[in-house]
Amino acid sequence: MPPEATDSGTIQMIALIVIGLGGLGLLAGLVWVGLRENKGGDPLQDRLAEFAEREMPGSLEELEMSMGFKDRVLLPLFKTLANRLSRLTPESQIEAARRKIELAGKAQKMDPRTFFGTRIMLTVLLGVGGGFVFFVTLKLDTLTAVGLTALVAYLGYYMPESQLKSQIKKRQERIIRALPDALDLLTICVEAGLGFDQAMGKVYEKWDNDLAQAFGRVIQEIAYGKMRREALRDMAYSMDVPDVTSFTAAIIQADQLGVSIGKILRIQSDQMRVKRRQRAQEKAHQAPVKMMIPMVFLIFPSIWLVLLGPSLIIILQGGH
């Protein structure tokens, strides 16, 4: 083969690698921007708060140019790509993602189509990157490289889902821990003469957690004309916590039957405290079982090494 042809093939290969790495870098940057956007607050409220503190620009062009490069270029580009990629996803999966986002408490911060677009883009990014590493860099055999590439691509698709499930679990645990104290405060306020809505307002004013924010949303919905039982049902549906579901069902039933809400709250408060004590006892009973793994694989080998090491050295030296 002539040297010119070899040089031309090498240059083409280098050009393809540079273009591929540039595309992967752009895609990784867009995915990173999208993930940062999902973790932050509401961008509209942030921009309004920022412009409320300073003098407004003179024109629309100045207003647009005053925004950062991320807000002006990267975020719109990422959202456009994510929406186009999410069109390939069935609507049932979009609704399931919307439900999980609601359970995670991020319905105001994360769009389900953007979430699915992020998953697809991560899958493509890790799949192409893994294929380049396994086929070109490591030069593995075809079957092994294909299997590892598929595994890496699946991890890119699964990681956002796993992160969302972890956020749902943590939020539900926070709600379960806060519910007994919130019921105590509700009981005290109602028995002191406040109405149930005003008692929820006191919880919302006193604490800043997921349960207090949900109570504040219920109060706002009632103020906008929504019936109390519907607002409570929606709150329980957005949490999917059995304790909250039983609490809201008892309040709705007491409201419909005309039973004293103070007595219902007192009973619910006692039951929630008993459940919290039972959960603490259950975790205490699980502690010895969970301690077995670090003890067997970490602590016992160290003890055996310290106790039996000198004896083994003496035996080995005596054998010589």
Image: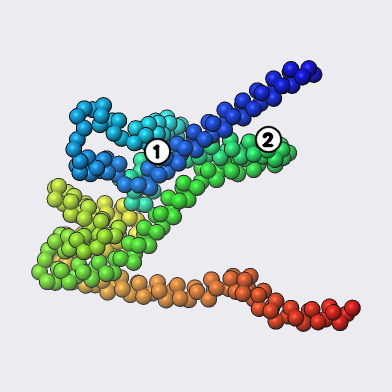
- Disc 1 secondary structure class: helix
Spatial CA span between label 2 and label 1: 32 Å
Residue 121 showing in the rendered view: no
Q: Sort mark 1 into few (<14), some (14-19) or many (20+) by Cα contacts within 10 Å.
A: many
Question: 169 or 297, which is in the foreground?
Answer: 297
Please identify the quarter of the rendering in which residue 279 is found. Answer: bottom left
Q: Sort mark 2 into few (<14), some (14-19) or many (20+) by Cα contacts within 10 Å.
A: few
- In the depicted structure, whether residue 270 falls above or below residue 99: below
Q: Is residue 314 left or right of residue 75?
A: right
**Type of amino acid under label 2:** Val
Question: 249 or 88, which is in the foreground?
Answer: 88
Residue 3 showing in the rendered view: yes
**Type of amino acid under label 1:** Thr
Q: Is residue 86 left or right of residue 19?
A: left
- In the depicted structure, whether residue 22 falls above or below residue 165: above
Residue identified by numbered label 2: 136
Name the quadrant of the C terminus: bottom right
Indicate the position of residue 277 as horizontal and vertical percent values. Answer: 36, 75
Going from N to C along the chain, the mark reached first, 2 or 1, is 1
Mark drawn on residue 114:
1
- In the depicted structure, whether residue 11 falls above or below residue 277: above
- Disc 2 secondary structure class: helix
Labels 2 & 1 near each other (Cβ < 8 A)? no
Please identify the quarter of the rendering in which residue 71 is found. Answer: top left
Name the quadrant of the N terminus: top right
Question: 37 or 4, which is in the foreground?
Answer: 4
Residue at 42% over, 40% down: 33
- In the depicted structure, whether residue 260 falls above or below residue 105: below
Residue at 86% over, 82% down: 318
